[in-house]
Structure formats: C-alpha cells, structure tokens
C-alpha cells in the first residue's frame, strides 16, 4: 500500500478556535475539573472548568490592558507547570499567538525564537528566566520586546489587577477575533539540523486534530473522569497537543516539572493514562529489572518479562493457549500488579511518541496490562499523524492515520502527510514552506512503509541514512534503538558515512550504573569514566551490539564501538529538549574518537 487516507469524523465551524474548548466545559452543568495543582501541603487540589475559565479571563484582560493586541506574538518560558497552561489559554483568549521556549534554552536560543517571531512580550517562570530573556534582548537588540512577566512572585497578580478595567465585551471581541484558519502558536523545531524553524500551527490544527482524535480514542483512552500527569516539556509539540486534547475531552491534568519524582507523582495522582517518550519506558523497564536483580529476583523478573512479551504476541495473533494464560496469570499476581501499582495502579493506556519504541517494549507493557499506543508525528504536524488504537493496534508500527489525516509513501520511501494535522507553514520562510511541500503533501523527512492494512512503520530518518564507502545504505536507528535498550547504555550513535565500515559511539547510564555494577561485581562508587574502560562493561556493551547486529546484514553490522566517559545530554549540547541526538554536534565534538576508530586496524 502506498497511500492511506481516513476521512474526518468531525468538522468544526470556521469561526471556532481553541478557546471554545474551555467554554464547552465552563458553561456546562458538569463543570469537570480540567486541572489539579499541588497546594502548600503538597496535596493535589482540583481546578474546575469554571475556575480555570475565570482565571484565564482575568489574565487575558490584563494582557489586553498591557497592550497585547490580536495577532501579537508572546513567548512562554517555564518548566512544565499549571501556570504554563493557564497563560497559554489566556494568550488565546486575548487573541495572541504563543511562542513556547524551552526553559533550558540559552540566551542565544531565546534570542532567536523571540527575534525571529518578533515577540512583543514574554511570560517566564522566575527571575532566572527573566535574566536570560533580558540578556538575550540586550545582546540581540530585540526592540519589539516590551514586557516580561513572571509566573512566580506577583507577576500574574499584576496582570490580573491591570485587567480589572477591561470589559467583558472587549475580551470577547479579542477572543473571537481568531477563527480556525488563524495561527494559534509558533513552535520552533528542536534544531537537530541547523537553525530552528518556526512552525505556524493554527487553531484548526489543534481543534480539528483534538476533536477527530477523540472521535476514536475518547471512549477508551480519554473517557469522562480520565486523568494524566504531564511531565514532558510543554514547549514541545507532543505535550502541548495532549494538553489541548485533555481540555477538549474534559480530562484532568496534573503537572510535574521534575521527572526524578515521577514515580511518587504517579502514585499520588493515580493517572488513567500517561504520555511519554520511549526513553521513559526504557527507564521504567530497566529500573524494574535492576531492582529485581538487586533483590535476588532477577530470574523471576526475566521469566515474567518473557511471558509478558509472549502473551502479548500470542494475544495479538489470537492464539494464546491455556498454558500460556495460566503462566501469565501467575506472573500477574507476582510481578505485573506491582509494576502497575508503581505507576499509580490505574494506568491502562500510555501514548508514546518522539521516537521509535520497539516491539519488545511494546509487547512487554501490553503483556503486563499497560497498553502503549505508539504514534508518529512532528512539530510540523501538531504531533500525531498516525496512532495505534486499543481496538486497532499492531505493535511495532505507529498505527494508522487519525481521522482527517492522510499518509503517502513517495517513490524514494519518504513519508508524506496531509490533513488536519499539517501546519500552515514556516513563519517568515515561504521558501522553506515551498521546499517542504509537494502537491499539497508535507515532506516529513522520515522514511517508512505502509502495510496492506494501512499501518505505518518508520524505518529511518532520510537525512540520517548512512552511505558507507562501499555504497551500502544503512539506517542507524535500527541498530541504535536496540543497543540503547540495554540497561547500562544511555545513548548510542551509529557512524560510518563514507567510511569503510559501520561503527558506534556509546555512552553509559550514570543512574543505572550503581545497581547494575553491584550485581556484577564492580567496585562501589565506580565512576562512569572508570566503568567505560572496565572489561565487564565493555563485554556487556559488546553483547548488546552483537544482539543488534543479528538483525541486519553483515555490511550493515557494527564492526567496532567506543564507550566514551561522558553522556550526551541537553546541557552538553548533544540532545534536543525532546531527547533526540544532535548527530552533527556529536560528530564534531567527538571527532577524535571517530578518527581513532577508523585509524585503528580495519576489522576483518
């Protein structure tokens, strides 16, 4: 199959915009809680639709009183927290366009986003962020920037106070000034291949994609009374879209900015569904496996994991026999219930995006009773183009198009997309917009294939395909994902472009190292640098490489690897905020390692 289109199930009035999703619940008799926030005693307290709507209006009036006009761009720079969603909707009620900025951004990155979008104001989390914005404004002469408000302190109260003189009629005129075709936000790409580009996402993208997704997921994944904990950066399109989707559904969202406390937050909030990137699911699995090893129950966990995968595969194929069901039942009592309890006890579905999950993890979590619905999308597509659904799932794929979306495979294997998800274009870059569309289809830059049932499988990134000196095309992700799944591995970068053979640079997981090393006889307190040269660690990474190599041809297999003594992180400049490796930056900074690999004796 070369093309798959799914007709829209919902078509909204052209005068509608994202603010109407809040009004839907604020003006209803049900008045469901849309959010929950922690009080001074660290207890979750619900925020009803009416309460949220009232505060959004108060802040929106303050923005209008402070000179924010319809169509003005305003930055948001903060960690994931309730106030992020609050000011996001307040900007939309004021008719403005929000410009998300990662709270980890440097002054130069902040300057680019604010300068390129010609933002007139910024709402930041605290004084540290304000200092970064002020430095960016000073260094780059951001003459458009007139105001900086803080979420902490009295910044939002000042806006509420400033808006007391603005009439309801004035606010309503601003709120309704934008229709579906108007720009709602400009989200800048993560910049793995150069300067970030501003993707213009419209109210149409958010409203129609949310409504159509709910038409197929609302009854099972996001039914009335559902709730989730948001821990991914709201500056990223994936979390941002789910945040809007939850409001559309009337689901409750809690926020946590620190993933280190995620398990505690899951246990206290008890979400019914979660969203995460594959690395989070890898961490959950590896942490559970290492804990079991440390408790002397490693063999039991390994057997339970194998059974979960086997049971999921058999169930998907419709041939789970009595013996397998019985074994699964036993492990559910011994192991799986404890894993579900660690995530709050009520999670039944998870949405995974931002990278490939892999069949092993997909089947494992399905087998323990947590169904992961893997999807696919980009910033340019408001996140999901396709997604697996509970009643229509094929693990190992990213599902079929959501209603209103279409997928097409070009002659060279590139995935093309069309539909309610696709952005309006790149802000101020008509040339880039023209380059990335062909006959109305958006060129994703990814390569993949559609099976005979319309399920999409991602096979690689077009720009990242390695062509060896011998002319062999190699998709690095096929190897990287498998190696990175090992508990001791943090990141893996496969290299070999124009080189005689394929190699890899591997980093170690510093958090996993103590427990992993303890069960394998490594010295207490061993550092990452020491571990990188330890024979036991090298042998473990070699085993992971050998296992990955078994899935590809000899010409595509990794012949040599090097373990480096530092990790790829966002702080080091080697990862984007969405956890994607900046391949060019790694190759530049680890050039000496690369050259050493290829100057060494060529493998047989």
Image (cartoon, rainbow, N blue to C red):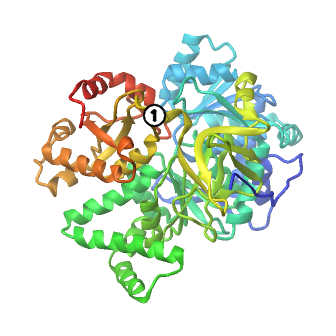
Please give the residue where the numbered disc 1 appears in the rendered image.
Answer: 466
Q: Is residue 191 above or below residue 386?
A: above
At x 45%, y 44%, the residue is 477
Q: Residue 213's spot in the image, x, y percent? A: 71, 58
Residue 47 shows up from this direction: no
Q: Residue 111's spot in the image, x, y percent? A: 57, 19
Q: Is residue 67 above or below residue 568?
A: above
Quarter of the image with the C terminus is top left
Answer left or right for 475 relative to 89. left
Q: Residue furthest bottom?
A: 322
Q: Nearer the viewer, residue 68 or 528?
A: 528
Quarter of the image with the N terminus is bottom right
Answer left or right for 70 relative to 149. right
Instruction: State which quadrant residue 25 falls in.
Output: bottom right
Q: Nearer the viewer, residue 327 or 292?
A: 327
Q: Residue 327's spot in the image, x, y percent? A: 36, 83
At x 38%, y 33%, the residue is 495
Answer left or right for 559 relative to 220. left
Q: Residue 471's spot in the image, x, y percent? A: 45, 32
Residue 389 shows up from this direction: yes
Q: Nearer the viewer, residue 485 or 102?
A: 485
Q: Nearer the viewer, residue 516 or 341?
A: 516
Task: Say which element carries label 1.
Answer: strand
Q: Is residue 167 above or below residue 356?
A: above
Q: Residues within 10 Å of mark 1 (few under 14, many from 20)?
A: many
């Amino acid at each position: 199959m070369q093309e798959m289109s799914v007709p829209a199930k919902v078509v909204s009035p052209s005068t509608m915009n994202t603010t109407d999703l809040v009004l839907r619940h604020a003006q209803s008799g049900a008045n469901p809680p849309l959010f929950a926030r922690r009080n001074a005693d660290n207890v979750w307290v619900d925020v009803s639709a009416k309460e949220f709507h009232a505060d959004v209006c108060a802040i929106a009036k303050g923005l209008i009183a402070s000179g924010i006009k319809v169509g003005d761009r305003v930055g948001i720079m903060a960690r994931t927290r309730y106030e992020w969603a609050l000011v996001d909707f307040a900007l939309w009620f004021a008719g403005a366009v929000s410009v998300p900025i990662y709270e980890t951004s440097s002054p130069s990155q902040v300057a680019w986003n604010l300068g390129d979008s010609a933002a007139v104001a910024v709402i930041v989390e605290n004084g540290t962020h304000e200092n970064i914005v002020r430095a960016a404004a000073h260094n780059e002469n951001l003459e458009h920037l007139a105001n900086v408000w803080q979420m902490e302190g009295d910044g939002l109260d000042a806006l509420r106070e400033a808006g007391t003189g603005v009439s309801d009629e004035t606010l309503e005129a601003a709120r309704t000034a934008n229709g579906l075709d108007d720009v709602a936000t400009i989200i800048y790409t993560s910049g793995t291949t150069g300067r970030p580009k501003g993707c213009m996402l419209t109210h149409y993208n958010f409203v129609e994609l949310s409504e159509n997704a709910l038409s197929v997921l609302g009854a099972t994944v996001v039914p009335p009374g559902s709730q989730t904990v948001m821990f991914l950066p709201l500056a990223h399109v994936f979390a941002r879209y789910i945040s809007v989707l939850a409001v559309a559904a009337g689901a409750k969202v809690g926020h946590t900015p620190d993933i280190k406390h995620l398990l505690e937050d899951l246990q206290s909030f008890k979400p019914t569904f979660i969203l995460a990137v594959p690395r989070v699911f890898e961490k959950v699995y590896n942490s559970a496996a290492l804990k079991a090893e440390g408790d002397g129950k490693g063999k039991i966990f390994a057997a339970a994991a194998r059974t979960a995968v086997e049971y999921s595969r058999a169930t998907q194929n419709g041939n789970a026999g009595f013996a397998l069901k019985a074994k699964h039942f036993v492990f559910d009592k011994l192991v799986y219930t404890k894993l579900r309890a660690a995530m709050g006890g009520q999670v039944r579905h998870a949405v995974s995006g931002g990278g490939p999950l892999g069949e092993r993890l997909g089947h494992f979590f399905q087998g323990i009773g947590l169904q992961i619905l893997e999807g696919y999308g980009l910033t340019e597509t408001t996140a999901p183009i396709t997604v697996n659904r509970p009643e229509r799932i094929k693990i190992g794929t990213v599902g079929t198009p959501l209603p209103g979306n279409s997928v097409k495979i070009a002659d060279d294997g590139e995935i093309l997309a069309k539909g309610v998800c696709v952005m309006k274009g790149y802000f101020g870059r008509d040339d880039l917009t023209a380059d990335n569309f062909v006959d109305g289809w958006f060129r994703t830059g990814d390569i993949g294939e559609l099976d005979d049932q319309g399920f999409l499988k991602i096979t690689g990134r077009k720009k990242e395909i390695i062509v060896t000196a011998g002319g062999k095309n190699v998709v690095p992700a096929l190897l990287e994902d498998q190696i990175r799944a090992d508990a001791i591995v943090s990141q893996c970068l496969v290299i070999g472009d124009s080189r005689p053979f394929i190699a890899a640079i591997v980093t170690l997981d510093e958090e996993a190292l103590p427990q992993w090393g303890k069960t394998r006889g490594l010295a207490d307190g061993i550092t990452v640098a020491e571990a990188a040269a330890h024979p036991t660690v090298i042998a473990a990474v070699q085993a992971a490489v050998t296992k990955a190599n078994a899935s590809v041809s000899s010409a595509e297999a990794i012949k040599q690897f090097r373990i480096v003594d530092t990790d790829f992180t966002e702080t080091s400049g080697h990862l984007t905020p969405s956890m994607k490796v900046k391949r060019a930056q790694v190759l530049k900074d680890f050039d000496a390692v690369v050259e050493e690999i290829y100057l060494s004796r060529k493998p047989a």
